[in-house]
Image (cartoon, rainbow, N blue to C red):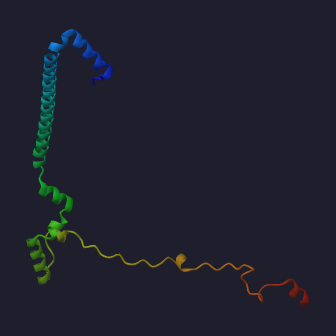
Amino acid sequence: MLDIGWQELFLICVVALVVLGPKDLPTAMRAVARVVVKVRGLSREFQSGVADMLREAELDDLKRKVSEGGRVDLGKAVKDAVDPTGTLTEDFDPADFARRLKQEVEGGPPTGPRAAAPSPEPAAPQPPSPEAAVPEPPTATPASQPAAARPSAGAGAAHE
């Protein structure tokens, strides 16, 4: 803002004292103080008016968002999030449940939306392949053979 130091302020006071004189200086200072107070009041009023306009604009924006949000069907959104395929609704449908229970008790073929879908059967376990069943023979190293099975140079020479 305005950067008025003590030197500048002192110079302004001396010039005002010389120009206005000691008699009119207090009256002039009161008039300047009133102008400064009015300017500050106007700036405060302007700032509060701008703040009010911003608040109203934000409120209008929030009101618009809320009215747009009110158009969303929350029940449908929750249903789509929890049960997107609709199988839970079918499973918990009381009329369908009563019909399936009656069919099971009477022993007839099942009807309804669940009857068309084949029931998943567990897959039969596959027997292991013959290659996997035969273990590889161990490879014998001279260090792993017993001492009696290892040919030794001294033992072969004694037998000859």
Q: Quadrant of the N terminus?
A: top left
- When the figure is inspected, residue 67 is found, relative to residue 12, above or below; the finding is below
Q: Residue furthest front?
A: 22
x and y, in percent, of residue 39 in the image: 15, 24
Find residue 22 and report its image quarter.
top left
Q: Residue furthest top?
A: 19
x and y, in percent, of residue 116 in the image: 19, 69
Residue found 13% across the figure and 26% down from its top? 42
Query: Is residue 46 at all visible to an observer of this figure?
Result: yes
Query: Is residue 5 at all visible to an observer of this figure?
Result: no
x and y, in percent, of residue 119 in the image: 25, 73
Residue found 15% across the figure and 39% down from its top? 58
Q: Quadrant of the C terminus?
A: bottom right
Residue found 32% across the figure and 76% down from its top? 122
Report the front residue among 139 and 48: 48
Report the front residue among 48 and 20: 20
Q: Specify whether 140 is left or right of 75.
A: right
- When the figure is inspected, residue 96 is found, relative to residue 62, above or below; the finding is below
Q: Specify whether 75 is left or right of 131.
A: left
Report the front residue among 6 and 84: 6
Find residue 41 and report its image quarter.
top left
Count the marks: 0
- When the figure is inspected, residue 118 is found, relative to residue 17, above or below; the finding is below
